[in-house]
């Protein structure tokens, strides 16, 4: 699942699909943390999943706001056409 997310980030050009791929990678990390936490009988992995979910929610909110503002300015969400951050 993590490899599918990495492939989506590397191959795709659409910013929304890239953010969805990053979310897929974070969910794969959560699944791995829960599995190891259950296997080892230690609740530390479950606490880490909570923090990863908070970071993922913040990333989604901030990323969507950036994509909306870039779309309003440039009328595109393709990352290879966005050169607003260049000098």
Image (cartoon, helix red, strand yellow):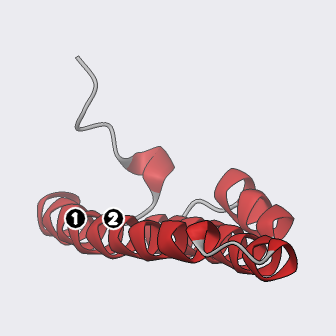
Q: Where residue 59 is drawn, which disc sits there?
A: 2
Disc 2 crowd, CA 10 A, few/some/many (<14, 14-19, 20+):
some
Do the numbered discs 1 and 2 sit on residues whose CB atoms are within 8 Å? yes
| SS type, badge 1 | helix
| SS type, badge 2 | helix
Residue 17 in percent (x, y) is at 55, 74
Residue 51 in percent (x, y) is at 40, 67
Work out whether 26 lies above or below 87: below
Task: Write the residue at 23% across / 38% down.
Answer: 84
Task: Write the residue at 72% across / 80% down.
Answer: 31
Task: Write the residue at 21% across / 58% down.
Answer: 74
Q: Where residue 62 is drawn, which disc sits there?
A: 1
Q: CA distance from mark 1 to mark 2?
A: 5 Å
Within the image, what quadrant is residue 78 found in? Answer: bottom left
Residue 2 in percent (x, y) is at 78, 66
Work out whether 83 lies above or below 59: above
Residue that sits furthest to the top in the current view:
87
Question: Can the viewer see residue 21?
Answer: no
Quarter of the image for the C terminus: give it.
top left
């Amino acid at each position: 699942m993590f490899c599918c997310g990495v492939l989506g980030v590397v191959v795709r050009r659409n910013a929304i699909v890239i953010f969805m791929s990053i979310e897929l990678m974070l969910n794969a990390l959560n699944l791995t943390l829960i599995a190891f936490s259950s296997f080892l009988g230690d609740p530390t992995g479950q606490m880490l999943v909570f923090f990863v979910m908070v970071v993922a929610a913040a990333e989604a909110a901030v990323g969507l706001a950036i994509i909306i503002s870039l779309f309003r300015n440039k009328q595109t969400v393709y990352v290879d056409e966005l050169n607003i951050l260049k000098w």
